[in-house]
Amino acid sequence: MTIRRQGEPIADWSTFLSVVQAFKGKWLFRGVLDNWSFEPSLERLCDRWSIRFSERPNVERSLLREFKRAYPTSVATAPPQDADDEWLALMQHHGAPTRLLDWTYSPFVAAFFALNLLLPTEDQERAAAVWALSIDPFEKAFAEPKVPLIPRARLKKRFLEYSKERSGPAFRDVFLQAKPRVAFVNPVSPFRLSQRQVAQQGVFLCPGDVAKSFESNLRAVPGAVARQNLRKLILPRTLLLEAFARLHRMNVNETTLFPGLDGFARSLRHRLPFLASKEVYRFTRY
């Protein structure tokens, strides 16, 4: 069953600032369109191809194998073969289907991504949304010495090992090779971070059982989807101009979030109102 949440309407940028500044404790944020559900790319594509949930663990293993085999080591150093959290992060970075769901520690980065998705949409009634998820239920659920969601002693030990050391083999044991699989979700951040993940203050939410939906995994964590721990802020289209201007002043834009020429080129889409309003380059060479 899809997680439903009554969105909190945000009228203007100052309202957004006051709301996010009132969050207490540690939170994660995700910027999407208001009608999106929590669905990683692997789950979404398997749905489109009518691949049954029971087949998805094998599909994921095959995808990992194909990506590792084709990875261009002449261009970039490959992660260790058994560091599957790093491999999945790389796959996610380059657009391959994975079980990972992108989140960020920054509500402003999340707002940028949400509004950036809204900008090209033709539906004038569509709105953007920033989801806010408290870390508190996860910390309570997996606190030492008791990890109730992971009942088997060895698997519990491997989970705690991964949480402390970011061990690739431990990640594989808990998330990819557990028998039987355990339904839960936990924040995941590989030891070696990509430049983009650093720039975006990114973190992944990783489900323990890809033979079930992400939302089923999330519901397995006590309190994770309770209203006080999962909130949805609605950003209307009328906020686009002001929000992008304010975010640009905060140095949150495609140039900074996507380092390199591609990010700069895409950032020019947000310069159109400025360039249209002033003849700043009329007499300059181009």
Image (cartoon, grey):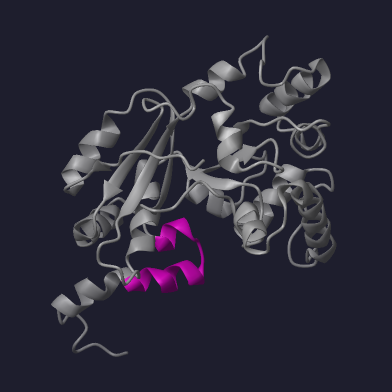
Q: Nearer the viewer, residue 7 or 23?
A: 7
Magenta highlight: main SS: helix
Membership of 262 in magenta stretch: yes
- Percent of width and height locating residue 271: 28, 71
Residue found 45% across the figure and 56% down from its top = 257
Q: Is residue 69 left or right of residue 140?
A: right
Q: Nearer the viewer, residue 29 or 37?
A: 37
Residue 212 shows in the view: yes
- Percent of width and height locating residue 194: 61, 51
Q: Which residues are magenta?
A: 254-269
- Percent of width and height locating residue 44: 60, 56
Q: Nearer the viewer, residue 174 or 196?
A: 174
Membership of 57 in magenta stretch: no
Q: Quadrant of residue 76?
A: bottom right
Q: Nearer the viewer, residue 278 or 146?
A: 146
The number of callouts visible is 0
Residue found 39% across the figure and 48% down from its top = 110
Name the image quarter holding the C terminus: bottom left
Q: Quadrant of residue 244?
A: bottom left
Q: Is residue 255 left or right of residue 44?
A: left
